Image (cartoon, rainbow, N blue to C red):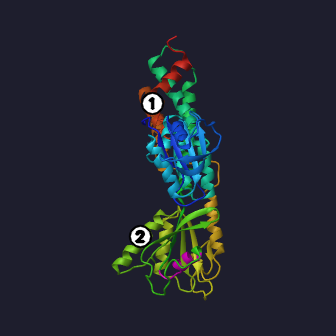
Amino acid sequence: MFDDATIVAIATANGIGSISIVRISGANALAIASKISKKTTFQPRLATLSYLYDTNNEIIDEALVLYFKAPFSFTGEDVVEFQCHGGVAIANMIVDEVLKSGARLANPGEFSKRAFFNNKIDLSKAEAISKIIEARSADAVKLLARQLKGELTNFVNEIREDLLFMLAYTEVSIDYAEEDLPTDIYEQIENKLQKITLKLSNTLEASRRREGMIEGFKVAIIGKPNVGKSSLLNKLLNYDRAIISDIAGTTRDTIEESVKIGTHIIKIVDTAGIRNASDVIEKIGIEKSIETLNEADIVIALFDNSKNCDDEDKKILELINENSNKEIIKVLNKSDLDNLFDKSILNNFIELSTKEDINPLIKRVEQILDSNTFGDEMTLISKRQVSSVENTLYNINLSKEPLSSGELEFFAHFITEALENISSITRPYENDEMLDVMFGEFCLGK
């Protein structure tokens, strides 16, 4: 839980802007606001223009004061917001006066924590709030807005209800064998298990496919030395970020930058040229290049149109074949020069010159990004949520054998584990929930 102190924090980002917001939450929020503004009454949810004063009765600022009466606020407590003029100094002066009036500084995430304990949000909505602030694309914002609206909460609740149904009937079968149970109860349970398994499997697949949508898709540019990787990065960024040289091995470390393609902000990584190198530092760079390739969502593999295909090119082809589960874009660069590269060993490739037009490549990357974000499937937004669903699915699969063999105690154990796993996404499972279903559904003990 949390203490009952009144807390305060600046709710807007640091820096200069037109408006800064100072937020207070707790039992004394309204009293503190009245003291600082010298106003005795505030109508809930109505903005009031007021001067704010310090302890020396000197004016700090003229600001809008908004009062949200409990429980109709984000935290479920009395909340007051001061919308003052932007800038670091004014907001900090207001915070100082609030602290002098008996509040304390809020800990990181404490407003959301209080909202959770006061049943204003669940854990899935709290995570969505955190992620939407850092969203890297318009599609990510739309997805997170759906979770704020309660889409994931409803998804979890539906599965919880089915699992509670199974657990309740199982406990009745074990402890109250004399009760009349539906003749098709085990068939109902098996059908529910199949539906849940399919639903969770589809959710995991969609979530893994769209993982980069929340954090930002990572695009790796790979190739042997001097195929134009750094030139491509510079062209994408529209400025000379990477050093370009005819000397092989110029890029010895990965260079990571963000760039917007379509509605997406992606992390694009220029890697060291992959070849058999004797230089210790260059070897380390090549190892990092391969590591980046393994981590990337999209791989752009560059080949030199003006050179014959050699063993280093074949090494690149071998590496991308090993990562065939990723989105691979093969690019034959330097199309403005005479062709010496055997095009027959590349299929479905893009031919261009980084000195001229790279729009065909940009359009292809955008198509891939869009294809990985569109869809109505439920998508999990954090590793914690993915782990919870994986564990739920694991325990559901373990429950199937004891159900078929009539070992109901073991079946109930695995279903209870699954309930706890899926519930951890939103709000922890409590045993009383199962008892409510048992005694409410079956009228036991009448």
Q: What separation in Å lies between label 2 and label 1 (alpha carbons)?
A: 47 Å
Q: Which element carries disc 2, helix, strand or loop?
A: helix
Look at label 1 and name its amino acid: Phe
Tag nearer the camera, 2 or 1: 2
Residue at which label 1 appears: 411
Q: Position of residue 248 (x, y in %)?
A: 45, 84
Q: Which element carries disc 1, helix, strand or loop?
A: helix
Do labels 2 and 1 touch, CB within 8 Å? no
State whether residue 139 is above or below residue 159. Answer: below
Residue at which label 2 appears: 288
Q: Is residue 405 left or right of residue 327?
A: left
State whether residue 117 is above or below residue 254. Answer: above
Whether residue 202 is visible: no
State whether residue 227 is above or below residue 297. Answer: below
> Nearest the camera: 51 or 99?
51
- Any magenta on residue 179? no
Over which residues does the magenta segment extend? 225-235
- Any magenta on residue 229? yes
> Nearest the camera: 226 or 15?
15
Mark 2 Cα within 10 Å, few/some/many (few <14, many 20+)?
some
**What secondary structure do most residues of the magenta stretch adopt?**
helix
Q: Quadrant of the N terminus?
A: top left
Mark 1 Cα within 10 Å, few/some/many (few <14, many 20+)?
many
Q: Position of residue 347 (x, y in %)?
A: 60, 73
Q: Position of residue 91 (x, y in %)?
A: 52, 53
Q: Earlier in the sequence, mark 2 or mark 1?
A: 2
Residue at image position (61%, 81%) is: 353
Quadrant in which residue 282 is drawn: bottom left
Q: Position of residue 293 (x, y in %)?
A: 47, 67
Look at label 2 and name its amino acid: Lys
> Nearest the camera: 441 or 317?
441
